[in-house]
Image: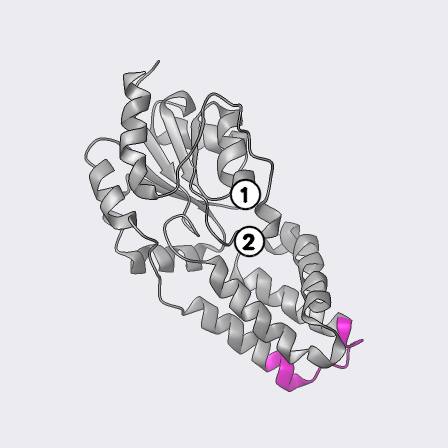
Amino acid sequence: MSRITTIGFDADDTLWQNEQFYRFTEQRFTDLLAEHGSHEVISARLLAAERRNLNFYGFGIKGFTLSMIETALEVTAGTVSPAVIKAILDNGREMLHHPVELLPDVAETLATLAPHYRLLLITKGDLFDQERKLAQSGLGDLFHGVEIVSGKDAATYGRIFRRHGEGPERAVMVGNSMKSDIVPALAAGAFAVHVPHALTWVLEHEEKPAQHPRFHEIVRLAELPDLVAGFNRS
């Protein structure tokens, strides 16, 4: 087996907290519209709007904010007040200014791996927001390359791992999303390591490829250095 030379990392909910801020803001949103439906009903309408809008707005807080406004207009039949629209915009802006909260073991694990492998940050979402979070994280100097992409599929991983390394066969992708981080990386020919997060957006769910020979799952990111070293001893 070829030696592993490159490790890609997802950002949101792999290196730092993300989904919890969406859940908190969604609760605020449904509270604003409580007279028009239950939390479950309003949340379902919001999710439907987000699903419709992904091809237009992409992933990230700005698209989420626009989907909240669209949902508010829908559930109120266009009568939503300017005060509610302002509150939605304020909540979205607050998300864009929230301090970065690193997940456990992240800084130590990356520092352990960086001298031995090319580390890549491979994330999707709004360019400005992801750049902001990376800068605030203090992790930027540990990465050989940073790729902020509109979506993650096998072709994207193949291109990135060839650009920054020796191709996907000698690379590992690490992340919390089966749909975005694991399944397409495996399809590209890379190893994929799932690090579950307690909160994962429903649109990122996909069946676990448990039988794939290059799929692995760990409980804590601190397990990663030993796991990757084991790949190279196989």
The residue under label 2 is: 59
Closest to the observer: 68 or 160? 68
Name the residue rendered at 53%, 23% in the picture: 211
Which of the marked residues, 1 or 2, is nearer the chain's N terminus? 2
Image position, residue 232 (x, y; %): 29, 20
Closest to the observer: 203 or 144? 203
- Write down the region rendered in magenta: 75-86
Residue 142 in view in this figure = no
Kindly give the residue lying farthest to the front in the view shown.
Answer: 219
Name the residue rendered at 28%, 18% in the picture: 233
Q: Mark 1 Cα within 10 Å, few/some/many (few <14, many 20+)? A: few
Residue 27 in view in this figure = yes
Name the residue rendered at 54%, 43% in the picture: 151
Q: Compared to 96, does 215 lie above or below? A: above
Splitting the image into 4 quarters, where does residue 36 fall?
bottom right
Name the residue rendered at 68%, 78% in the picture: 33
Q: Mark 2 Cα within 10 Å, few/some/many (few <14, many 20+)? A: some
Left or right of 121 in this view: 201 = right
CB atoms of marks 1 and 2 within 8 Å: yes
Amino acid type, mark 2: Phe
Q: Compared to 133, does 169 lie above or below? A: above
Amino acid type, mark 1: Gly
- What sort of colour scheme is used for the picture? one colour
Splitting the image into 4 quarters, where does residue 135 fall?
bottom left
Splitting the image into 4 quarters, where does residue 50 fall?
bottom right
The residue under label 1 is: 151
